[in-house]
Amino acid sequence: MKRAALERPRTLNTWRQHVVKHGDLTRCVCEVQAGRFRKSQRAGGCGRPRCWLCHGDKLGSLPTIRVRKGQARYREGLAEIA
């Protein structure tokens, strides 16, 4: 329970952002469930790991910055040898 108490301000902030995103048009079950956003659910994200809009880089197999740096170092190393 200590961790939940420590994370409460961040959780409430994320929940408020989510409720503001909905606006006045729709009612959502999450409007009365502030604790739902305690663990890593973003206000702007949908929470689905297979969503192309939120995770297009992962699903499209685009390399991360770390991988691109490694590839560049590898190419530079091969150029120095040759």
Image (cartoon, rainbow, N blue to C red):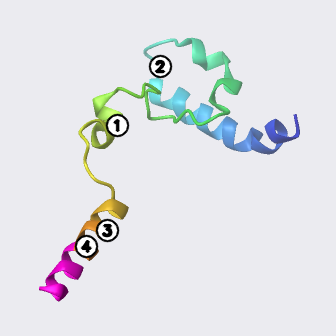
Choose the circle earlier in sequence order: 3 or 1. Answer: 1
Q: Quadrant of the C terminus?
A: bottom left
Q: Main secondary structure of the magenta part?
A: helix
Rounded to the nearest whole Å, what is the CA distance between mark 3 and mark 1? 22 Å
Q: Nearer the viewer, mark 3 or mark 1?
A: 3
Q: On the image, numbered disc 4 is attached to which residue?
A: 74
Which of disc 4 and disc 2 is earlier in sequence?
A: 2
Q: What stretch of residues is rendered in magenta?
A: 75-82
Q: Quadrant of the N terminus?
A: top right
* Residue 50 higher or lower than 5, as above or below: above
- What amino acid type should be assigned to the residue bearing mark 3? Gly
Q: Are marks 4 and 3 in contact (CB under 8 Å)?
A: yes
Q: Residue at x 47, y 27 (%)?
A: 47
The verdict on residue 27 being magenta is: no
In primary-sequence order, the first of circles 1 and 4 is 1
Secondary structure of residue under mark 1: helix
- Among the two numbered marks 1 and 2 on one chain, the one whose residue lies closer to the N terminus: 2
Q: Amino acid at mark 2?
A: Asp
Tag 3: Cα neighbours inside 10 Å, few (<14), some, or many (≥20)?
few
User: Which residue is under mark 1?
Assistant: 55
Check disc 3 and report the residue beneath it: 70
Q: As rendered, which of 14 and 3 lies closer to the eye?
A: 3
Going by the numbered disc 1, the residue's amino acid type is His
Badge 2: residue crowd in 10 Å (few <14, some 14–19, many ≥20): few
Mark 3 or 2: in front is 3
Give the percent coordinates (x, y) of residue 44. 44, 35
